[in-house]
Amino acid sequence: MQNVLIIGATSAIAQAVARQFAERGANLVLWARSAEKMGIVASDLRTRYQAKVVIEAFDFVDFSHHAPALDRAIAAHGELHAAILCHGSLGDQAASQADFSVTDQELLTNCRSALSFLTLLANRFEQQGHGTIAVISSVAGDRGRQSNYVYGTAKAALNTFAQGLRNRLYSKGVHVLTVKPGFVDTPHDRSPAKRARSSPPPDRVARDIIRAIDREQCVLYTPWFWRWIMLIINLIPEPIFRKLKL
Amino acid sequence: MLPFGLGRSYGDSCLNDGGDLLVTEELKHLLAFDAERGMMRCEAGVTLDELLRFIVPRGWFLPVTPGTKFITVGGAIANDIHGKNHHRAGTFGCHVTKFELLRSTGERLICSPTENTAQFAATIGGLGLTGLITWAEFQLLRIENSMIDVEELQFANLDEFFAISAESDADFAYTVSWVDCLAEGPSLGRGIFMRGNHARGDSLSHRLHRPPRLGVPVEFPDFALNQYSIQAFNTLYYAKALEAFSRKIVHYDPFFYPLDAVNHWNRIYGRRGFFQYQFVIPFSGDRKVIREIFQRIAASGQGSFLAVLKTFGERRSPGMLSFPAPGLTLALDFANQGWETLSLFNELDQVVLATGGRIYPAKDARMPARVFQECYPRWEEFRQYIDPAFSSSFWRRVNSPV
């Protein structure tokens, strides 16, 4: 993986992934909304690993920016070998329930912006005949639950879209990885009620992601035990599931 | 609100009962490193542990380090920490060239010895009260390998300690002594003097420290540490230095951070926990004061198996409320025996104040407001630099009218 694009580069998982790629000597292109935060992340990568890092700050809901930004990303270090989508917001389920415009905004940030990136990347990687696209989704997309089904809907759409791409691009030498993290000890997942004591640090999740990219795995649950938790959750019959407080 | 790093201060200076804490764990980025001059700029939540992992392989070391590497850069500045090299290098604050202070108003101040000098002085040793330090720049120390060339010498009493100390301070970058504070009579103040320098030469190991492998899984019962078990420990520890003098090359990790090898070592004090008591008293011709302090501790029967004695040097810190001053410092820990322990501290306070000494806020959980205000006469000047939205449990305790 020589040249890697990281979208949503200031997220805790993205930062950990970037550090591990930089440690291997990769050249990085970072995208995020906040230029200031991303500047700090880039300084860290340059200081620690002498990494070549190019950054571009823009709001991901501005779709007209996507294609030219990708051109610049490719111009920065040459052909991309991997792109990792890490952006998103956990959203506010209560506010989304009360007001569809909030739901719409969540779908825009967590899903539609990602679908736009995926479309562009898929076509580009198909053309070049190689590359890996990794999408950070969530276990929340596996089954709708009352506590966060809006977020779950966005992630479910992302999962299906990525699954379709994986199928379409397999024969073109392009690999698509869907990453489904459980709770991770990051600001994204941190609310007093929700913080699980057993939450793994983002470094461990990043290590799993990079290993899955190397092994061309299709779907990664991380940490590993979420595969089994979600298997059980998915096996609960819907008439029973609807009664549960999840 | 109050910035919170790793919470390793022994008392309530890192707590804010009923208020908010600004957890700095995401401020962990390195911002710039000048490999030629050893100048490091990093965010305030970076720990000394992480810094060492970066700088040691590049031939640099911390300019000043305390007895644990599990503290943050922000905490090192806020407490203006000192180490075994104080007699030469001064405090951590002496090596800070610049930092950014974020105030609750959103204002960002670049503070250095030439810009915003008052905030610079107030923030070094300012216990996190002047605002949030977002990043800091400081000068590192050049090393040739990871090893320390250490000598250990037994001293049979305080007079011998002073004799060794006088001959060591000039030739050794690091000096510190462990004292058996339960020994009485002719052995009063016996202990082991450790002195060392960074080893020279490229041929020695450059390896890093490893993560802790030992841990104390549960709290010990309260009776585990008592006068007799501590006496036994101290006697054995003193006798460990079988010869009166030994010299060896050791890695920096056991030399500087012996307790870091054991996770949750504090649990051996049981549920009631322990107090630290650290003071500095000025050098004076006679040694009556320190002798009196040791006598009072020995007489109280409340032992400490970590009693650390060291001389502080003349190098002044820029910090307005900085603790170290030229003289003799003693750090002790005492199992919490409630009233008995607290009244011993009140006694010691009087001796320390009478001789013009002071007590270390980072290790304090009990000093009365009157004692603090007498120890730090600049506290009123300091007050004007406190961020209006910042406070701490410690500050509310010592800031109250006397």
Image (tube, coloured by chain):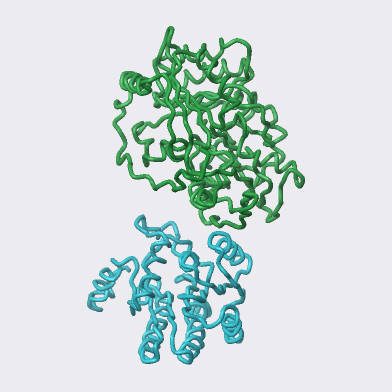
Chain colours: A cyan, B green
- Residue B380 pos. (x, y %): 70, 32
Q: Can you say which quadrant of the picture contains the N terminus of chain A?
A: bottom left
Seen in the picture, residue A163 relative to A39 is either above or below; the reply is below
Q: How many circles with numbers are drawn on the protein?
A: 0
Residue at the image point whose x is 51% and y is 38% from the top? B199
Please state if B125 lies on the left or on the right of A18 as rendered.
Answer: right
Q: Is residue B353 visible?
A: yes
- The image quadrant where one finds the C terminus of chain A is bottom left
Would you place residue B276 above or below residue A227 in this image?
A: above
Q: Quadrant of residue B126?
A: top right
B165 and B306: which is toward the camera:
B165
Q: Is residue B340 visible?
A: no
Q: Is residue B280 left or right of residue A185?
A: right
* Above or below for A125 versus B103: below
Q: Is residue A166 left or right of residue B46?
A: left
Q: How far across and down, in percent of the image, does residue A200 sit?
A: 37, 60
Q: Quadrant of residue B153?
A: top left
Q: Position of residue A60 (x, y in %)?
A: 57, 79
Q: Residue at x 43, y 62 (%)?
A: A202
Q: Position of residue B346 (x, y in %)?
A: 52, 19
Looking at this rendering, what residue extends furthest in the top direction? B185
Q: Nearer the viewer, residue A199 or B310?
A: B310
Residue B223: quarter of image: top left
Foreground of the two, B201 or B238? B201
Q: Vertically, is B73 above or below B12?
A: below
